[in-house]
């Protein structure tokens, strides 16, 4: 038999997951893939690399697999500092 506290905890967790899904969706809508593509193609061009979709995908996947995780991790640790700069 389920206890009231356990049920309340499960309901709260469900609300948290829904909130996360909502916030994650809003963030995904905010991301501008065309800007990311432009940055990648600009860098390919600056380095005299063929401007192909395949080369752009290689760069993007490499960033996702290697650099993005560390960059996100570092930024998350600095959220208070980033907030102060944002409000300055």
Image (tube, rainbow, N blue to C red):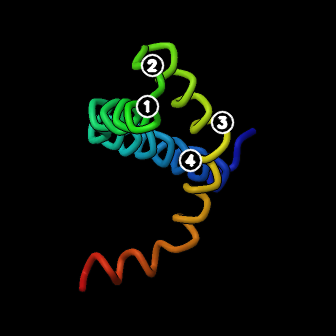
Element assignment for label 1? helix
The reply to whether discs 1 and 2 touch (Cβ–Cβ < 8 Å) is yes
The quadrant where residue 59 appears? top right
Report the quarter where the N terminus lies: top right
Residue 80 drawn above or below residue 31: below
The reply to whether discs 3 and 2 touch (Cβ–Cβ < 8 Å) is no
Q: Which residue is mark 4?
A: 13
The outermost residue toward the right is: 1
Residue 25 appears in the rendering: no
The spot of residue 11 in percent (x, y) is 53, 45
Alpha carbon of mark 1 to alpha carbon of mark 2: how far? 7 Å
Q: Nearer the viewer, residue 18 or 7?
A: 18
Q: Which residue is mark 2?
A: 50
Residue 76 drawn above or below residue 40: below
* Between marks 3 and 1 in the image, the one whose residue lies nearer the viewer: 1
**Neighbour class for label 2 at 10 Å: few (<14), some, many (≥20)?**
few
Element assignment for label 3? helix
Q: Which residue is mark 1?
A: 44
* Between marks 3 and 2 in the image, the one whose residue lies nearer the viewer: 2
Alpha carbon of mark 4 to alpha carbon of mark 2: how far? 48 Å
Alpha carbon of mark 3 to alpha carbon of mark 1: how far? 19 Å
User: Residue at 58% of width from left, 28% of height from top?
Assistant: 61
User: Residue at 57% of width from left, 23% of height from top?
Assistant: 58
Residue 12 appears in the rendering: yes
The quadrant where residue 36 appears? top left
Report the quarter where the C terminus lies: bottom left
Alpha carbon of mark 1 to alpha carbon of mark 4: how far? 44 Å
Earlier sequence position, callout 3 versus callout 1: 1
- Disc marking residue 65: 3
Alpha carbon of mark 3 to alpha carbon of mark 4: how far? 30 Å
């Amino acid at each position: 038999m389920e206890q009231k506290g356990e049920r309340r905890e499960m309901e709260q967790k469900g609300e948290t997951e829904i909130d996360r899904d909502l916030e994650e969706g809003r963030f995904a809508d905010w991301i501008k893939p065309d800007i990311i593509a432009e940055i990648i193609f600009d860098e390919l061009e600056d380095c005299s690399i063929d401007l192909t979709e395949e080369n752009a995908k290689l760069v993007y996947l490499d960033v996702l697999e290697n650099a993005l995780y560390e960059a996100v991790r570092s930024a998350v640790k600095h959220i208070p500092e980033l907030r102060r700069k944002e409000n300055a």
